[in-house]
Amino acid sequence: MDHSHDHTHAHDDAHGHSHDHSHDHAHEHDHDHHHEHSHAHPAKAEFTGVDGKIYHSHDGLAPHTHEPLESPGFFSRRAQPLSTRDYKERAFTVGIGGPVGTGKTALMLALCETLRDKYSIAAVTNDIFTEEDGEFLVKHGALAPERIRAVQTGGCPHAAIREDISINLGPLEELSQSFKADILLCESGGDNLAANFSRELADYIIYIIDVSGGDKIPRKGGPGITQADLLVINKTDLADAIGADLKVMERDSLRMRDGGPFVFAQVKHKVGVQDIVNHVLKGYEASHRSQS
């Protein structure tokens, strides 16, 4: 069985993450794929992804296995921003999600500080039973207090960003109208890797993880890791202490996100923040071009 595959990989600088994967696979197989592949050449090993396509482990990036982590992410098939969005009713909304303690509120603060001089910004934070994150932003002078709203979601924070978004839509629309906002920031309550924003709520989605959970986190996948518009890997300064290998995290992020963008950051120390801002503004500008 002769599989002739032409792979062009434009792997730019590791941290610019402009990874152009051109996979031109003309697979006209009249047989099903229940046979065993001979893995004589691991660098060319192939496997069938969960989407039914045949993929390969390239350039010896990782030992070949048939575990789900080898399947590329679905970044290219993620839900796109709604073309019917009325930004006059509610400004361009950035959703910031991720597990507890990864740095979501610190990123909210950094984005406010970086954007507030050029753009009209307002923010909504979600906490399960407190208003601690909103109070943090007020205490650190992220924005004028009246531009910040804290929402208590109760025990299911994921519902407030996906299934029942009205608890966030109300404050966001009110802030947008009151301050003629250009950009709204919405921080989800800390949740697990399965949580992600609805496109009804977020026009641009940032998912933030950190190295404290170990270098295995990117390959665990989940919609936030694979489908967010931008993945942020925070607290890289802790990698040595934790024993996390950033090269492994980079490799797995490339694979799980199928080339989608991600940024290594130390948000507290402002490392990587400008890269994150640039990605957000790129999304903001694209959203307005699409409606002009």
Image: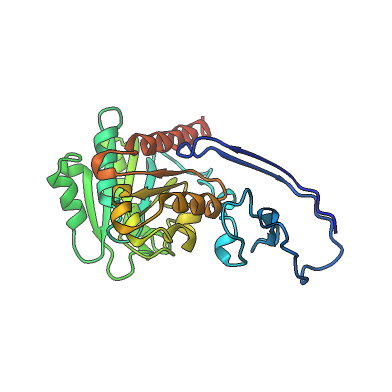
Quarter holding the N terminus?
bottom right
Residue 271 relative to residue 197: left or right: left
Residue 156, x across and y down, in percent:
33, 69
Q: Nearer the viewer, residue 234 or 238?
A: 238
Depicted 141 relative to depicted 253: above or below: above
* Residue beneath the point at 44% across and 53% down: 249
Quick one: 283 or 21, which is closer to the camera? 21
Tell me what residue is drawn at x 30 percent, y 49 percent.
235
Where residue 211 appears, as percent x and y from the top left, is: 35, 55
The residue depicted at 77 percent of the width and 72 percent of the height is 34
Name the colouring of the figure. rainbow
Q: Is residue 221 visible?
A: no
Q: Whole-percent x and y of residue 193?
A: 41, 63
Q: Is residue 129 above or below residue 148?
A: below
Q: Is residue 173 visible?
A: yes
Residue at the outermost left position: 139
Which of the pair 81/4 is nearer the observer?
4
Q: Which percent across, then down, holds residue 164?
A: 39, 63
Left or right side of 49 for 234: left
Q: Residue furthest front?
A: 40
Quadrant housing residue 21: top right
For residue 22, what is the image quadrant?
top right
Number of numbered discs overlaid on the protein picture: 0
x 53%, y 34%: residue: 290
